[in-house]
Every structure is written in C-alpha cells, then in structure tokens.
Amino acid sequence: MNEPILSVARLGKAYRSYKSEWLRMLSWFGVSVGYSTEHWALRDVSLGVAAGEAIGIVGQNGAGKSTLLKLIAGTLSPSEGEVRARGRIAAILELGMGFNPEFSGRQNALHATGLMGIARDEVAHAMPEIESFAEIGEYFDQPLRTYSSGMQMRVAFAVATAFRPEVLIVDEALSVGDAYFQHKSFGRIRQFKEKGTALLFVTHGLADIRALCDRVVLLDRGRMVREGAPDEVVDYYNAMIAEREKTTVAVEQIRLGDGWLRTRSGTGEATLAELTLTDADSNQELMSVRVGERIVLTARIRVHDSIPRLVLGYMLRDRVGNLVWGTNTWHTGQVVENLHAGETVEYTLCFTCNLGPGSYSFSPALVSTDTHLERNYEWTDNALVFEVINTDKQYFVGTNWLDAGFQIRRDGSH
Amino acid sequence: MTIAPNLAGAWRYRQFILSSIRAEIRARFTRSRLGGLWMIVHPLAQAAVFALVLAEVMGARLSGLSSDRFAYALYLLSGMLAWSLFSELVTRCLTLFIDNGNLLKKMPFPRICLPLIVTGSALLNNVLLLIAIIVVFAFSGHVPSVHLVWMPALMLLTLAVGLGVGLLVGVFNVFVRDVGQVVPVVLQFGFWLAPIAYTPDIVPPTLRRLLYLNPMTPIVRGYQDVMLFGRAPDAAGLAWLTVVALVLLGAALVLFRRATPEMVDVL
C-alpha cells in the first residue's frame, strides 16, 4: 500500500473537569493542578487512509464518531496522539457554516470560501462552476433569506465542495435536498474519490456506507472495536446493537467461499435448523434460480426455551448489500405465541423470483416483535446465498424483472 | 491547518475577515430606515441627554472656551468618542467566542480572525462617529485644531486597551460565564470613573487619583485636549499608558493562545 495521505496515530481526546474553571486556566501556564474528573471521548485510535480511499465510520450515539471527525478536521485539539495529512483537509461537519442571510448566494460563496482559507482569485475562477452546480437560477444573486431551505443546502454544498481537497470529511451531510440533488452530490463525492481524495464519513445510513466505502471503522465507547470490509463491519455492528439489548451469545462471523460473509448473533432460545430453497413445482432444492421461477423458501426453527412470541423476518440483499426486499411475520400478522422447548416451527415462503440476474442472499431473523432490538433469538446475515440466472427472458439488467414490453409505431410513409 | 491564533494565518483569511466586516455593516443598513445612522445617533443622543441634564451644573466650569453655550456638549462628545470605541470592543469581545460557538466547533480557521473582525467593525463605527462629531463641532462654531493629527495615535491606543481588556474577559467568559454578567456592571463604573461627563476638578483632590486607576482616563483627557481644547495631549501620560496597553494586549494574546485548544471543549 502506498503511503497514507492521512494518518491518525493513537489519537485520544479527554474532557477534563476541574474544581474551578480558574484552575483549568492556571493549568495552561504550567501550574500543575489536578483535575477532578476525566472523560475520554476517544482513545487510542490509529488509522491510515490512502489517496482515493473511502472510510466509513459507524457507531452508536456517543461512540466518538463526531469527536474523531472534529479532531481530524482540526476544530478540536487532541489530548494525545496526532493527525497528519498531506494536503488540504476540508470538513463538512455542517452545511452552510458562516453563511449570512443578507448576502446573495454569490456573496456567500465568496464569504464561505474565504472561511475555508481559499484565495479570492481561485474563488473567482471557480464561481461559474459553483453557480451551475447549485442550479438555483437567478436566485444566486438574491439574498439568502429569500431561499427555500433546499436551495440554501444546494448553494452550501456547491460551495463546500467547490475545491477538491486531499482529505474530505463529511458528517451526515449527504442527505442534501431532493433526490435529484442528492444523486448529484454523491456523484461529486465519487468524482473526488476517483481523483484521489481520501474520504471519511459518518452516516447512519448503512446503505450509503456499503455503496461508497472501501473500509469501515466501528467505534464503540470511544474505542475502535473493528475495522475492515464494509459488509463485515456493518453486519457486526448490527449484531452488536442487538446484543447490547440482551447480554449473552457472542457474535460469530464466517467468510463463505464465494466472498459472502455470514454473521450470526442472538440469545439462542430459538434457532434456525434448516433453510432451503426449492422449486415450487418439482420440490427440487435449488442453488440457482431462473428469472420468473416459482420458488419456496422453507425455514425450520427449533425452540430451545419457552418463549412467549416468535416472529420470523427475512431480508433479501443483492451482492453489494442493497436491501431488495424484507418483511416479517409481525407485519403479516402471523405471530406464533406460547412456544415450548423442543417444539419445531416450519415457515414456508412462496414467491415468484422476479429478480434480475446476479447473486442474492436471504438473512433470516428470529425475534419477538417487529424489530430485532427487543429480543433477538437468532439473526443470521446471508444465511442462504443463491444465484439468479436469466435463461428464458430477453436480456435485461438491474435487480428486478419487470414484465414490460415495448410497443413501437412508425408514422409517415418515407 | 492550524487554529492557533497567529497573524500569518489571519493574512490567508483576510478575505473572510473583510467580508465579515462588510456583513456586519450591511446587517445594520438593511431593513432599517436610518440604517447605519443609528450607530451615530445613539452616542449623540446619549450626549444630548447628559447635556440637557448636566449643562447647568457643568457649563460654568468650562467657561473660557470660545463657544460657551455648547462647551459642555462638546466636552461630552469628545470623551464619549473614546469611550464608545473602548466599550464596543469590550462588550463585543466579551461574548465573541460564545456567540460564535457553533462556528468554532465546526470550522477550522485561525481564531484570531474573530477579534480582528470586531476590531475592524468597531474602528469603522468609530471613524464614522468621529466624522459626525466633527460636523457637530463645526455647526457649533468650533473648528478642530491641527492637534487633530494626534487622533490616529489616540484611537490606536484605545484600540489596544479595549482589545486587551476585551480578549481577557472574552476568554474568561467562555470558561466562567459569570464574567459576562459582571463586566457590563464594571463598564458602568468605568464610565463614571473617567472624566467624561464631568471635569476632574469637581472631584475632591483626595479622590482624584482614583480616576487614574482607570486606563481610559488619560485617553479620554487626550481626546478632550485634541478635540476641544486645541492642545497636544499629555505625552508622558500617554507614553506610560502605551506600555500598559501593550502589556495588557500581550497578556491577552498569550491567554487567548493558551485557551484556544480547550475553548471548543467547553463551548
């Protein structure tokens, strides 16, 4: 691996409180005063990010994500360790910082880029690009206070990303405005990445993480608990959230032969004994499924302890982890109640495979209500992986088979 | 990127500083009829109130001036010109970091930009007030003397004292919020502990030395000398005050520098 463009070494941030704030001030001048309490919001985080690499940071509230971003951005000063970067670091911790409602979009662009420390002639050069990216027409020369909030976000994002930095830090700022602009913002960030910008971002949208990140870091209570491939860390994180609610059963992860990662967690009162995919007509077990085939997914659940309620949920994901479909028997009103140890429950799910060609996985979850957060008996990510092939339909791409047909009519005689 | 207050950093961010000053001025002008005039009207109106109330008492003491009728009003204006710059700097700096808390948390920029913006806009206000006061003087038949060339030096000195005190209390206020409540009260005392609304000779001689506890006293007297009495200010007194001002400003900058890493932690 080439030399990282951003390296974070044993970074830590402690918040200290003193008996009196005046004592804190004395401590800056070399007077040794003891602090009364110390709280480490982040400790011992080391990370190297290469040019063009995207790192996602996940963790629950208070895990230290924002602290880490602020330390790297430089608004917070580390209590120990250091951050080193080659080149400019830009941080979008909040969009529209420093914007003035009385200024026009153009004046705000000048003002805010000034706050980013960018020279005026460079800004003048980039102004047409900012204006066209924001796409707010003649409003660009009207005072900001007349803008809708969506328009403000557009200008703010256009300004914040007007200059490609070597390191870009984004904190939950990608949900900008309408779908069209979101798409466009994502595009710009991808472009930066292709040109060699190292990306670091925090988002609660785990789908974003899977789609954009090369590597994911999981923070928990100020520590880096895991770092690795997106699916691995995100699934581990999901399992961890569930586990936190209960106490027992460790999370286990196995990398399957074809690259899929199976993550299993839960308290184990009910477990999955068998999960099979069969053809609805022939009852043959399937590894690959034809587009449009009627298939049956059968799960046999063994109950090991008496439980009041059992809900089975499925998530169907594509190769990159996008959620294609999902529901559970809570939503369908088919909750099984008063189960006893030793019972088995069989669930069959019958459907037509209207999926596009590619690899898919089913993740079953055995829970007690509509989410896995109350009781998680067993959750298995990617328990069953299958291939969808297109044998008898016309060529198409995407994750969905639509029964669509063209009708073409030509008018005119020549 | 360093957020430490240093002047090299500030130079890179000059564009931001200038446009922030512009923003402040614009904020005053937009959507109010008199706009920027208010910043002149306020001190003038305050002077008018004092003049109405105290003219009879104080007027006699200022006889010997060319225009007796307005003498006291002009005396007041000269002192208030100095005081308004000082108090604007102190009050603005007092809440400067607290008001800009979110910006400090979210954007890395040299922190010195903030007091520089305040300095720029306060100075601009004060120059406008100076011009307005010169106009008032002219109407009352009082033409400023050549000693007005002292004005820039006096303003710089006021600036140094104001910024020094302002930054100190501003930084303190981030950590100990009571400071924000105490300072306006102290400022009120400060105003009356300087010979702005009265002449020093009405103060009993034993108490007169108290006035010189206030660093603004020599400055206020300097303004009055230059603007009203048409004589050079007391150079020795001002030289001594310059030393005080530089020490104050230096201490404030050192404190500001040391406080910067922890400031965001408590905002």
Image (tube, coloured by chain):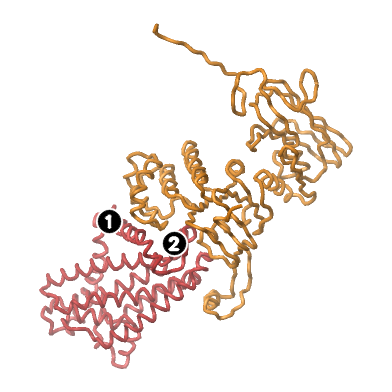
In this image, B89 relative to A66: left or right?
A: left
Query: Which residue does the numbered mark 2 point to in the structure image?
Result: B109
What label sits on residue B29 in the rendered view?
1
- Residue B101: x %, y % from top left: 47, 61
Q: Specify the subunit that label 1 lies on.
A: B
At label 2, which amino acid type do we have? Phe
- Residue B144: x %, y % from top left: 14, 76
Q: Which tint is chain B?
A: red
Q: Residue at x 36, y 52 (%)?
A: A122
Query: Which is more N-terminal, label 2 or label 1?
Result: 1
Question: Label 1's element?
Answer: helix
Question: Label 2's element?
Answer: loop
Residue A144 seen:
no
- Residue A71: x %, y % from top left: 55, 60
At label 1, which amino acid type do we have? Phe
Q: Where is A403 relative to B227, above or below?
A: above
